[in-house]
Image (cartoon, coloured by chain):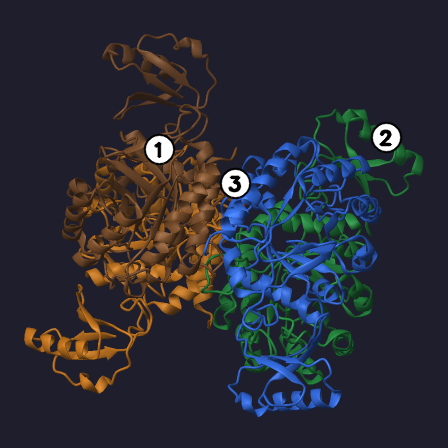
Chain colours: A green, B orange, C brown, D blue
Amino acid sequence: MIIQVKTDISDRQKEDIITEVNKVGYKVTEVQTQLGTYLIGIGSANFDIRKFGHKEGIQDIHIVSDDYKLVSKKWKVKPTSIDLGDGIHIKDGDMALMAGPCSIETEEQIIKVIDHLKATGIKIMRGGVYKPRSSPYAFRGLGLEGLKLWHQHAKAAGIKIVTEVMQVSQIEEMYDYVDIYQVGARNTQNFNLLDELGRVDKAVMIKRGISGTIEELLQSAEYVFSGGNEKLILCERGIRTYEKASRNTLDLNAIPILKSKSHLPVVVDPSHGIGIRQFVSHMALAGVMSGADGVIYETHEVPEKAYSDGQQTLDFHQSALLADQIRQTFALRNSFVL
Amino acid sequence: MIIQVKTDISDRQKEDIITEVNKVGYKVTEVQTQLGTYLIGIGSANFDIRKFGHKEGIQDIHIVSDDYKLVSKKWKVKPTSIDLGDGIHIKDGDMALMAGPCSIETEEQIIKVIDHLKATGIKIMRGGVYKPRSSPYAFRGLGLEGLKLWHQHAKAAGIKIVTEVMQVSQIEEMYDYVDIYQVGARNTQNFNLLDELGRVDKAVMIKRGISGTIEELLQSAEYVFSGGNEKLILCERGIRTYEKASRNTLDLNAIPILKSKSHLPVVVDPSHGIGIRQFVSHMALAGVMSGADGVIYETHEVPEKAYSDGQQTLDFHQSALLADQIRQTFALRNSFVL
Amino acid sequence: MIIQVKTDISDRQKEDIITEVNKVGYKVTEVQTQLGTYLIGIGSANFDIRKFGHKEGIQDIHIVSDDYKLVSKKWKVKPTSIDLGDGIHIKDGDMALMAGPCSIETEEQIIKVIDHLKATGIKIMRGGVYKPRSSPYAFRGLGLEGLKLWHQHAKAAGIKIVTEVMQVSQIEEMYDYVDIYQVGARNTQNFNLLDELGRVDKAVMIKRGISGTIEELLQSAEYVFSGGNEKLILCERGIRTYEKASRNTLDLNAIPILKSKSHLPVVVDPSHGIGIRQFVSHMALAGVMSGADGVIYETHEVPEKAYSDGQQTLDFHQSALLADQIRQTFALRNSFVL
Amino acid sequence: MIIQVKTDISDRQKEDIITEVNKVGYKVTEVQTQLGTYLIGIGSANFDIRKFGHKEGIQDIHIVSDDYKLVSKKWKVKPTSIDLGDGIHIKDGDMALMAGPCSIETEEQIIKVIDHLKATGIKIMRGGVYKPRSSPYAFRGLGLEGLKLWHQHAKAAGIKIVTEVMQVSQIEEMYDYVDIYQVGARNTQNFNLLDELGRVDKAVMIKRGISGTIEELLQSAEYVFSGGNEKLILCERGIRTYEKASRNTLDLNAIPILKSKSHLPVVVDPSHGIGIRQFVSHMALAGVMSGADGVIYETHEVPEKAYSDGQQTLDFHQSALLADQIRQTFALRNSFVL
């Protein structure tokens, strides 16, 4: 159960509600976000909502049977829009493009990518400065210094930054330089990280776990929301299956399912989803048709020379072509009754 | 290695070639199809093609390192077109629509579906008369009598029939009444069935196995082709993974990969691929964008009353809408450089 | 619901029971096996068993809610024992060893394996004469002639034969020469084959499908049982997962689960289960400890020269060692309360 | 390549070696652990070892082609023994038992479990104080206070503690109270956590990721080792597959494979591996037979009342029985040539 309370509720009124909810055998967690205060009741007994539905201070009560509550569409039918400032949004009914290299490598590279994005009308740049690598001996990214350099150029160009945060201690140090914190596929169930991101007033994009279920992705988003941060984006990036002809198995089924279960925007990552440059555009467009609100993909001036993920990275020519095709595909999908 | 031989090759010339190929350590299998004769050399040694490349009777020689040979794009770059007669084709550059119920149930149902297909401009009707069911106590279909009834109405309406064949003994009895034999996901590696379908001069559509790899699907097609039948269609219908929010995980990655590896047309089945009526259209359109040459989906006048698969079956209104959306999506994709 | 009827039931009495069961909304399938006659009622309504429980001709009635019925332990608590003749059984409380090459290759090979089995006290020989191969160009086995030759030597030595049957037409031709028909992992859901094996009075061992669930394996066994054949053995042989360090993922969890759900004996195949010679013994012994009633493994005089599966085949020395270790392990397990 | 250097090597000698290794195109990472100093060379070119093999300060050079190096058996054939003090070891050739509740709940519970362990001769107690939970509203453990309480009783009883660490900041605060840090299945690729655990002089047990490969588990161990900590234990606890009849699919294949690839001890967790109380003992014993050096399982005085995982937890009677069966099984396995 989710109880939305009024902004001017008194402590006394709140305690009063909690006491009544406890009486029907429900534990209550209080959640304060940027947008409101919620009392989340967790329990399994049936109860008569009239017992506390009339209490002062209550704005609305919703019965949400899903294990995730606050990210569910059952209480909040209106889609969530993520406002990145400067008129840039990620939301249902719009198409957010995010592109950039796997890793931030050099200042020259940053400048070239930003020039490409500006020429293509792409407003959000992706790139890794902290790189999760399965081998401890691999390149692990430029770190905070790289991020600062990147931020300086991006800010000047009016480009927003989405980049991966790998641990709690990085959240604060990255704060001034990112627009969207990305939670990577290996950290989808790093609950401490999610908890802390709940305390930040900045957008968070959560990638589905390497073998995460749709349910688990929503639960992970619930962590951040219940920690106090409503600015959430979900991302399908492929799952691990027995099939090895592609890097991952892009599960586009997840996109309409997530959109129907949650009010959060959903983005698709075709680069990791298939892992083969030649087919990234096919999967990006398929993702758009399946209902995605955005596409995040990898691009680099010379993919063959990229420090990582070159095999799935588009060059600028391919990227420009794709951005245009995505827009046309999105326009067509928007004209459909689905 | 694939050696295409001339149509007027003499037995003597053929033996001569085989002898030489054997000398370099390759075993030779002779394949005769509707369109030509091929000598397939299987071996792993390196050899000098000049040793037999000049032999009389040879039209062309191709080195194909894949385990599948005849279905590979490496020797036959031009896409295969399946001609069903009456101007109906399944082929690259075209969009084949196949729709109909999960099971053929009654004459009345047949008539209603055919009327719907005609009104929608769909030329190929799907439906099961032999139904593979995991429980021996479930409805197993109307069998041959159902097929005959169906064929009578379909023929009159100029509609082609695709339906599943489950065992060798059915091939002959179904022959006069089907246009495309479908090999179901549980029979993708029923090698005896594939062998026998190689001896038939009628189109065969092979569905990917429930947990089949892309490679295995191509090998299964190789069985039919090497048995003598080039009229082959591949179908992606979702694979089994840990994710249970959908019936299967539709692996759209497979579509551009199959199209790049093989010259055969590739069809997508969104109904089984997601298994949820509400999202079948999303996945159908995503499949088209990923590169499919056709879409096969389930439709029924009253899905709730269907004998089987009702939960993933579109009603006629939804079906008509989808057919139109598929055509628009396909037209847009065709305008793209991908 | 399973209604066991008396052996001397009259047709009139049977019809009478069926009529009453139909009245509560249940469809009835009559099953006649080697051991008895059963009326299987399929439906979902609640009913009062007193409505027909007293009817003449009824021996016993069991409510079985599983989708599989006749293979369930819910009505038949006593484990099924498969009698192969000559005092050889496969059953709970005993340890059946089955060993032999992947493929039957030559008469010399047959003789050598049989000599090894006799020396080791192994009573059942495995081997393939019809080989399912993913490539149409690979060795497909010696066929019926190979089986006859094998049978001649095996019979003389008092050794029983288990070998794979791939299609309906082979059942009859193999009948005189096999003791156990094996249904391979690619045919677990070849329902026509299962139907026909239900009509045979000879033991059938069903391997779990390549990505088959435990439930599906039991349903496949239900096909054969409901077709009339109670002589069934289940076999765990590894499933397909994302892990590629082993050929398959041997799912030993399945063994105690199958034993608790069904009265049928369960055998483990460590050779296919891990696919690496060096570790076959580890997994065989683990399988015994998990509760298997038998072990089937591959052995060959010179594994490196085997026509197929050499990499997972034990030589005779390893095989003799393993047979002894299995017996000791089984004796220890038998002394445990589990 | 791994270069073991002498303890008395001078900085000059070290630089000299690194310079030469760089010359053949290899990057060098220096690793200092409790036991030695290693120079890890990463590269792919072939080179002539004589170019630097004679350099002063070098004790030994090993070519290790695996992606993981320091945890590989290729350079260190002798199994690693983890010394927990007081004569308690985890090592090849021995059987380490670790048992306890899923969550530490109360002081009374701690005392009861410790009494049970002492009576059963089990020296290591498991239990969670920081619990990773997919829902933010679930019980998350008693935290540091719970750990201190537990440690007080365990120390008095001579029992060692293994418990999960979830984030970097907990490492230091837990240090005085744990004997083995456990890295949970959701943190196997939390590389920051692994890095930090490399800086600690205390044993670390890494659980295989929920859908982690064997290779990835070894790479994660490489993180800790290359960070400076050689005291490592690997744990197989089941992987995620399509099969839902058990909580996870316990991959016992992984045990002999891990033992053959790495010198580290390997432990099996049958409780999470199957997730069904009734079959935990079967899988524990199977794990022992497959080659495990230890077993970690869940026990609680009244499993039905456990705060978490009750369905897979043994009561004390079952636990005592299992401990005895494990010892007998291990003794038998030790008598085998495998």
Query: Which residue bears the numbered disc 3?
Result: D282
In 3D space, how far apart are the residues under numbered discs 1 and 2 (Cα atoms)? 55 Å
Could you tell me the amino acid type at mark 2? Thr
Q: How many marks?
A: 3
Is residue A269 in view? no
Left or right, D158 with reference to C34: right
Mark 3 Cα-neighbour bin, 10 Å: few <14, some 14–19, many ≥20 = many
Query: Which residue bears the numbered disc 2?
Result: A19
Q: Is residue A327 above or below residue D42?
A: above
Quadrant where the N terminus of chain B sits is bottom left
Residue closest to the eye, C166 or D24: D24
Q: Residue at (64%, 84%) from the top-left corner?
A: D58
Q: Cβ–Cβ below 8 Å for labels 1 and 2?
A: no
Mark 2 Cα-neighbour bin, 10 Å: few <14, some 14–19, many ≥20 = some
Query: Which residue bears the numbered disc 1?
Result: C222
Could you tell me the amino acid type at mark 3? His
Q: Cβ–Cβ below 8 Å for labels 2 and 3?
A: no
Residue closest to the eye, C138 or B41: C138
Q: Is residue A15 above or below residue A128?
A: above
In 3D space, how far apart are the residues under numbered discs 1 and 3 (Cα atoms)? 26 Å
**Which corner quadrant of the image does residue C30 belong to?**
top left
Left or right, B147 with reference to C91: left
